[in-house]
Amino acid sequence: MLLLKKNKFLSFIKIILTKIELKPIILLIIHSSLWRSYLHPIIFFFTKLPLRLKYYQLFRINKLVPINHLIAIDIIQELSKIYEPYGVKFFLTGGQLLGAVRQGAFAGRPQDVDLGLIDTHFDKFYKNIDLIKKNFNTLPIKIGFDKKEFKISNPDFAIIQSNVKQWTQIEDSTFYRFETDRFQFCLDKMLVDIEFFAIKKINDKKYWIGNSPKLSNIFFSHNDLLELGTIKPYDLKFNSPQNPEKYLKAAFGENWKTSKQKQFIWKK
């Protein structure tokens, strides 16, 4: 509803600008270096000022946390707070976990949020998926396949498949989608990736595994995800797997501690 009102308002503004013949001048300004270098960054800063004030404790005179980092922080913190009463515990994976361990801040300029859930926690999360709608402004997400034909065939992921079955029976479009190894939706123009993990027996030992063939070499020991550890990027608490270095080595290689690109560093 909020998004619809915003679109109507923007359409109304465009009509007014066209009527009074200011539209060409404004378009000229928007495509100028003045807009790109000065005006847009200033306007963007003030539109995100409420978020900066919300995390005022992160303010440092010589170290301004990039806005994409703040958006990712806020999404994770809010999701964790909303679902904690239901026993759902998200933990950092991917670039979020890499940066948190390596430099005390998320890696790169995060375009998405990488989180993990064990299958039983995902089940509780999905049964309360309406909490996302109630607490966030969601954005539409495209589905590039026939939803009714989609399924997860891995027998170890039976709990996930039962949720997929519910999803395929929903006639209307949804703000989220399943992939073979993860669940996705958009918040504040940022993609949220929730990878699910299930128990698999290997040589009579239980391991948590993901369903992605790209990460087939990653196994979490049974207690690594049952009893999550904590990590403190930006001096804020986030859940993480125990022994996260094992995951990072398997996911990003032996040189995961060394970045090839300039990174925002909160703490070395």
Image: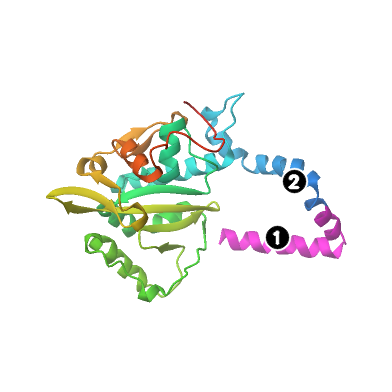
Instruction: Please indicate whether residue 40 sits to the left or right of residue 52 in the image.
Output: right
**Residue 263, relative to residue 217: is it above or below?**
above
Give the farthest residue toward the left: 204
Q: Tell me which segment is drawn in magenta.
A: 1-28
Does any portion of residue 182 appear in the rendered image? yes
How far apart marks 2 and 1 lie (CA) works out to 21 Å
Q: Secondary structure at mark 2?
A: helix
Pointer 2 with pointer 1, Cβ within 8 A = no
Residue reaching furthest to the right: 21
Circle 2 sits on which residue? 36
Q: Position of residue 201 (x, y in %)?
A: 16, 53
Q: Residues within 10 Å of mark 1 (few under 14, many from 20)?
A: few
Q: Judge depth for marks 2 and 1 and give the one in front.
A: 2
Q: Quadrant of residue 220?
A: top left
Residue closer to the observer: 151 or 256? 256
Secondary structure under tag 1 reads: helix
254 sits to left or right of 29 = left
Q: Work out whether mark 2 precedes mark 1 in sequence or the reverse, and give the earlier one.
A: 1
Q: Quadrant of residue 2?
A: bottom right
150 in relation to 179, above or below: below
Q: For the N terminus, give its image quadrant.
A: bottom right
* Residue 10 marker: 1
Q: Is residue 132 magenta?
A: no
| Majority secondary structure in the magenta region | helix
- What's the residue type where badge 1 is placed? Leu
Residue 23 shown in magenta: yes
Compared across the picture, whether 38 is left or right of 197 comes to right
At x 40%, y 54%, the residue is 131
Q: Amino acid at mark 2?
A: Arg
- Vertical placement of residue 267 versus 162, above or below: above
